[in-house]
Structures are given as structure tokens and as C-alpha cells.
């Protein structure tokens, strides 16, 4: 396809894409400080259920991801992002007015469906305008903007709660979405010309999915990616409760989480430095082995009855390792899954993202609901996931020649 000419200056375009990508991170991380307050008001008899606020959003996003790629190929990138913003805002307003946890969970699924538009269509905009090393450079800068959000979102959420209560966070989501959508709508032209659009077809999605599932490398990679996402989402959905109920550290949670998020960015930087030399498969193997060792050690520390102060710092190091695992593996696994699917790149990205995200929710929910006031059930669940993922790596083969190309 002939490239559209960028209409914005590069710094403005990078800032806009970074903010658009950050919709998902802000929607998850800003909610974390609110979970105790929501549990106390809406589900006091079963406070563990409040963590479903995280996984319900992820579930909606995973379902929406399956369709937003093909829809953006049919209707253009901007309509999908702007339409997603409308759905996202509707979900936020429903959650703001909700009087029951069930209504909040339904609203969060709706928000996730809306957030799937920016998640996929913004990537397509970058692909439309740039390619090769220039695209990689643009994405790297946009991801730097994106990476700041998990560090500051919990502090923003805590500040909003202090001023307005937990419902105010949903109004912040509305403001965020209106700002991003208005900026994109006014400043960024459509990047997919009508002549290059393709009809939306459920049969095309079905046939593409069938072809993907016949390739062992793709199916195994999706399973491993699902387990890695499951570990990440289980951690995200329980981390605030662990700080609050296990360590009585709810007040300091936003600051610790922000520090962990910033340091965990080293995982992506480390991967960028070593993956060309050692290969994607080997980086994933080493990362999973390291996570198994650290999680097993953390479980032993808990069972040994280590005192609260030392256990707290051990927990902080452990969740840091999980976030770094994500940085070291998710990009590599996506690349491995896409490797044999160049002719189905757009559809493949949607399917891989959707299946792995929805599957991860099915893993994360039971792990999170097993939380009993200590991090042990979560650690055991993550240890099992990491061990199964490492076992599945045996079925990927080596593939050094393919990776080097």
C-alpha cells in the first residue's frame, strides 16, 4: 500500500500515539487504588470479588481485539478509534452511576470493548505512515510515553479517590478518552485511503483462524503468551489487595507500584540489547526459568514464616520480576506467533491478541479469587503457569535460521 504522508510533526504524532496506546494502561492501573473502597461499598461480604474489576475490563478488551483489526481495514482507522472512544465513555459513565458490583463489572467489559479500538487501530496508523527502522523508532518513542502511565496512574487514581471518592476515577476516564479522541479527531487525518479498504467478513476471519490453528508454532506460541498474560493479569488484579490486606500498606501502594513500573521497563531495554544475539526463543526460555526460580524461592520464603518487613520487600522484588518477565517475553512471543503469517498480518495480530487475552482472563480469575490474605496462592498459581509455559517451549523447536532473517 502506498504510504500516506504524515500530517503532524513527529513529536506531536509520537505524543498522540503514546496517549492513545496508554488508554489500556490508564484504565487498569488507575483503578488499582480504588479496589478496597469499591469492595467495602459494593461487596463487603466478599472483598476478593472487587479484583474482577480488572479482569472484566481485560475480558472486554480481548473480545473487542478480535474484531477491531478487520473493522479498521474496512472502515478506516479513525472511525474505529473514535467509535471505540464512544463505547469506552459509555462504559465509564455506567460504572460511575452503578449501584452494584455486577453493574460495574458489566460497565468494565463495555469499557474494554471500547479500548480495543485504540489498542489495535493506533498500531495500524503507525504502520500506515511508517515502515522499517523508522517505524521501529517511532514505536520506541511512543512506547516511552506509554511506559510512564503505569508509573503515575495509581498516584493519579489515589489523588482522585482522596478528592472525590472512587467514582471520580470513571469521570477521569471520560476526560482522558475525550482528550485523546478530540486530539486525534481534530489533528490526525485518516491514514487508510478508501481504495485500500477491504470488506469485513466473518468468513475471512474464520478461514484465517483455521489456517493459524493448523500451524504448531502459532498455536504453541498463543498458549505460552496466554500463560504469560495470565501471570501478569493475576498479579495486577491482586497487587493492591496484597499491599492492603497482607502488609497494611495501602497508603504507600501508588508509590511502590510506580517505582516497580519504572524499574520493570528495564526488561524491555534488556530484551532489545540481547534478542538479536541470542534469539527470541532463548530469551523466553531464560526468562521463564528465572521466573520459576524466583517464584519458587518466594513461596519458600512465605512458607518459612519470614517476618512482615522482609516478606514485604521479597514481595516487591517478586512482582518486579513478573513485570520484567512481561517485558522480556511478550514482544518476542508476538513476533514468534506472527513469523509464519506475513500474508495474514492484520488478522493474525487481532486473533493472537484476542485469544491470548481472553484465555489469560480465564487463568487469572481463579488465581486471583484464591487470594486468602497472603501472596502464597497467587505465587503457587504463577509458578504453575511458568512451569507449563516452559514445558510448552519444547514444542517450538529452535528456529535460529528463521529468527535471524
Image (spheres, helix red, strand yellow):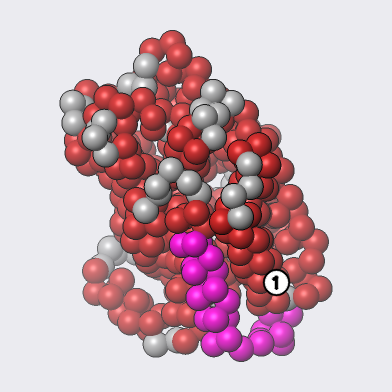
- The C terminus, quarter of image: bottom right
Left or right: where 382 falls relative to 282: left
Q: Main secondary structure of the magenta part?
A: helix
Left or right: where 87 falls relative to 312: left
Q: Residues within 10 Å of mark 1 (few under 14, many from 20)?
A: some
**Which residue occupies the extreme front position in the image?**
305
Q: Is residue 203 magenta?
A: no
The residue lying toward the viewer, choosing from 234 and 311, is: 311
The residue lying toward the viewer, choosing from 184 and 169, is: 169
For the record, the magenta segment spans 380-405
Q: Is residue 392 magenta?
A: yes
Q: Is residue 237 above or below residue 270?
A: above
* Residue drawn at (29%, 64%) of the image: 199
Measuring from the top left, give residue 360's x and y in whole percent: 40, 61
Measuring from the top left, give residue 59's x and y in whole percent: 33, 52
* Residue drawn at (45%, 56%) of the image: 377
Count of numbered labels shown in the rendering: 1
Residue 68 sits in quarter = bottom left
Measuring from the top left, give residue 387's x and y in whole percent: 54, 73
Amino acid at each position: 500500500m502506498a504510504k500516506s504522508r504524515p500530517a503532524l510533526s513527529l513529536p506531536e504524532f509520537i505524543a498522540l500515539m503514546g496517549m492513545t496506546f496508554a488508554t489500556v494502561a490508564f484504565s487498569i492501573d488507575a483503578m488499582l487504588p480504588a479496589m478496597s473502597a469499591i469492595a467495602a461499598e459494593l461487596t463487603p461480604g466478599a472483598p476478593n470479588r472487587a479484583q474482577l474489576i480488572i479482569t472484566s475490563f481485560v475480558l472486554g478488551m480481548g473480545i473487542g481485539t478480535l474484531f477491531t483489526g478487520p473493522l479498521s481495514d474496512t472502515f478506516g482507522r479513525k472511525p474505529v478509534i473514535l467509535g471505540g472512544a464512544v463505547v469506552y465513555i459509555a462504559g465509564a459513565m455506567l460504572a460511575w452511576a452503578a449501584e452494584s458490583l455486577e453493574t460495574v463489572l458489566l460497565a468494565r467489559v463495555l469499557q474494554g470493548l471500547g479500548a480495543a479500538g485504540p489498542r489495535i487501530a493506533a498500531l495500524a496508523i503507525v504502520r500506515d505512515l511508517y515502515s522499517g527502522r523508522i517505524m521501529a523508532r517511532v514505536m520506541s518513542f511512543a512506547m516511552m510515553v506509554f511506559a510512564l502511565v503505569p508509573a503515575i496512574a495509581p498516584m493519579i487514581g489515589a489523588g482522585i479517590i482522596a478528592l472525590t471518592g472512587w467514582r471520580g476515577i470513571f469521570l477521569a476516564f471520560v476526560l482522558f478518552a475525550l482528550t485523546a479522541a478530540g486530539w486525534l479527531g481534530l489533528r490526525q487525518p485518516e491514514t487508510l485511503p478508501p481504495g485500500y479498504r477491504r470488506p469485513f467478513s466473518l468468513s475471512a476471519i474464520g478461514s484465517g483462524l483455521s489456517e493459524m490453528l493448523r500451524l504448531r508454532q502459532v498455536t504453541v506460541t498463543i498458549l505460552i503468551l496466554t500463560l504469560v498474560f495470565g501471570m501478569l493479569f493475576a498479579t495486577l488484579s491482586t497487587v493492591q489487595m496484597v499491599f492492603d490486606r497482607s502488609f497494611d500498606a495501602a497508603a504507600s501502594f501508588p508509590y511502590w507500584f510506580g517505582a516497580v513500573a519504572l524499574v520493570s521497563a528495564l526488561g524491555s531495554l534488556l530484551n532489545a540489547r540481547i534478542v538479536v544475539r541470542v534469539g527470541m526463543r532463548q530469551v523466553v526460555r531464560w526468562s521463564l526459568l528465572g521466573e520459576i526460580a524466583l517464584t519458587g524461592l518466594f513461596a519458600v520464603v512465605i512458607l518459612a514464616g519470614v517476618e512482615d518487613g522482609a516478606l514485604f520487600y521479597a514481595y516487591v522484588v517478586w512482582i518486579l520480576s513478573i513485570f520484567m518477565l512481561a517485558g522480556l517475553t511478550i514482544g518476542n512471543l508476538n513476533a514468534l506467533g506472527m513469523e509464519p503469517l506475513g500474508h495474514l498480518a492484520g488478522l493474525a495480530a487481532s486473533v493472537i491478541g484476542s485469544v491470548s487475552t481472553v484465555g489469560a482472563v480465564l487463568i487469572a480469575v481463579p488465581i486471583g479469587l484464591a487470594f486468602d490474605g497472603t501472596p502464597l496462592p497467587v505465587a503457587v498459581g504463577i509458578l504453575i503457569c511458568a512451569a507449563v509455559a516452559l514445558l510448552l517451549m519444547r514444542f517450538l523447536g529452535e528456529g535460529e535460521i528463521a529468527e535471524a532473517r
